[in-house]
Image (cartoon, helix red, strand yellow):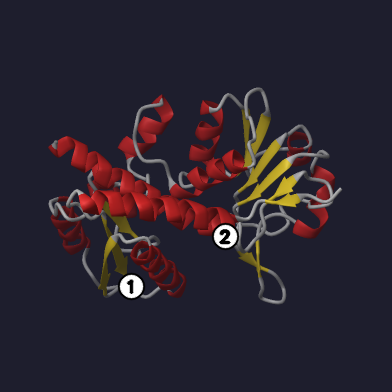
Amino acid sequence: MTAQLIDGNALSKQLRAQVAADTAALKAQGLTPGLAVVLVGDNPASQVYVRNKVKACEEAGLHSVLEKYEATMSEADLLARVTALNNDSSIHGILVQLPLPAHIDAQKVIEAISPAKDVDGFHMASAGALMTGMPGFWPCTPYGCMKMLESIGYNLTGKHAVVIGRSNIVGKPMALMLLQQNATVTICHSGTQDLKAMTLQADVIVAAVGKRNVLTADMVKPGAVVLDVGMNRNDEGKLCGDVDFDGVKEVASYITPVPGGVGPMTITMLLVNTLESAQRALSDTH
């Protein structure tokens, strides 16, 4: 059997059309959802991400502001900008693109963003809300993964999910979201002794370590669902994920491709979060 693809581009289109419709409805009530994207320095990958985020906003009818600063910008100046955006009622989401230059404490900057505008879901208040099952913003990449599972009608109750990776951006929040849907969750990482023994038990595997071929066909039980969050380059310089796609697709029931899988979903969920923030702001004023 060959796995069915979970097409992130197609699902994104669908969700973005919904965001555009909901945005138009908000605009009719006199409110335009706004996202501010702050870029410090000239990391080439960050520039591409930021451009894509702003473009996606505009296509969905959201208002977006891109603020670019030199890599020499001081931490105090960046914190002052974040505070100004916190107080700007036309902005509902604030995203400071990571990584930041070495002299700036990224965690300090993230914590300076108002939790009500933390559409990246990285603030400690957002992490705490996810941990305790309270309303808050979910980090965009794992949130996108959950939407992909939802799109294939996958019921996680009682299933064993293995998450490879324990970052604050993907691994940990992913595990909590799967847990909320009644999956039994195992988190694996560089300290895990026998990764294969773990993944062979899994009904769902999320690979999110940023290492090529971390998951190969012999590590996947037949019929498992495999979500590949990795973004790497192969020897030819082509984009690839953490999963040996050609091998694993012959064993899994569903698999996400790279590119065109989880990637587009990340930006889509950013739009979803920004829209939700604007909707909350509107209901707070009524």
Q: Earlier along the polypeptide chain: callout 2 or callout 1?
A: 2
The circle drawn on residue 9 is: 2
Query: Residue tagged by mark 1?
Result: 41
In the depicted structure, whether residue 93 falls above or below residue 68? above
| Quadrant of the drawing holding the C terminus | top left
Residue at 42% x, 29% y is: 131
Residue at 64% x, 35% y is: 154
x and y, in percent, of residue 226 in the image: 69, 45
How would you rate the neighbour count of disc 1 (Cα within 10 Å): few for under 14, some for 14-19, many for 20 or more? some
Quadrant of residue 157 within the rendered picture: top right
Mark 2, secondary structure of its residue: helix
Mark 1, secondary structure of its residue: loop
Quadrant of residue 283 within the rendered picture: top left
Depth check, front residue: 258 or 31: 31
The circle drawn on residue 284 is: none
For badge 2, the amino acid type reads Asn
x and y, in percent, of residue 57 in the image: 35, 62
The reply, left or right, for residue 216 in relation to residue 242 is: right
- Count up the numbered dots: 2
